[in-house]
Image: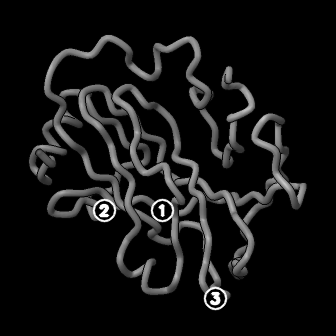
Amino acid sequence: MILTDKQILEEIEKGNILIEPFDRAGLGTNSYDVHLGRYLANYRDEVLDARKHNEIDVFEIPEEGFVLRPGTLYLGVTKEYTETHAHVPFLEGKSSVGRLGIDIHATAGKGDVGFCNTWTLEISVSQPVRVYYNMPIGQLIYFEVSGGIENYYNKKPNAKYNKRTITPVESMMWKNEW
């Protein structure tokens, strides 16, 4: 079941959901709007290797915005830091963003219970489009969990994305044992 606006506010009051900064205007009927953070990143190498650490170059979005180009994967980050201690958070794109031809995540829209961080966005575009710091970019939807939880994400010793950051985070696939 998806939390409604009233339930999201109740869970924030209980401390089960944290959104920083929180702006009540971002609260939808059953979601919360998140905004594009100050930084984007690109991978340095044209060919990425799933078994190696692929390094990124992080840059600040200028005040006049930045034009995203097709054929390039951009890593972005949400302005909002979130913590979700009792629900499963899902990050979805906003329809107005999708109508500009912007996809904000290639595969990873679901967070885990216990996820505490900003959200790295996997951004691609179908045609050139200018984006800006602080523009609405997505929405968080919270699902109720049925049953007890043994492994909260922020408590897992092998969790790869626990370090709090304001910049996009590159793939940590290379840390997996396979």
In this rendering, is residue 115 above or below 54?
A: above
The numbered dot on residue 127 is 3
Residue where numbered disc 1 is placed: 35
Side (left or right) of 100 relative to 133:
left
Asked which secondary structure carries label 2, the reply is: helix
* Disc 2 residue type (three-letter): Gly
Q: Amino acid at mark 3?
A: Gln
Taking 12 as reference, is 174 left or right?
Answer: right
Instruction: Indicate the quadrant containing the C terminus: top left, top right, bottom left or bottom right.
Output: top right
Q: What residue lies at 25% left-to-right and 29% top-to-bottom?
A: 16
Query: Which badge, 1 or 2, comes first in the chain's sequence?
Result: 2
Determine which of the numbered discs, if any, sits on residue 26 in the image: 2
Q: Residues within 10 Å of mark 2 (few under 14, many from 20)?
A: some
Q: Of the residues under marks 1 and 3, which one precedes in the sequence?
A: 1
The amino acid beneath tag 1 is His
**Disc 1 + disc 3, Cβ < 8 Å:** no
Q: Determine whether, in the image, residue 154 is placed left or right of residue 71.
A: left
The foreground one among 115 and 26 is: 115
Residue, far right: 45
Q: Nearer the viewer, mark 2 or mark 3?
A: 3
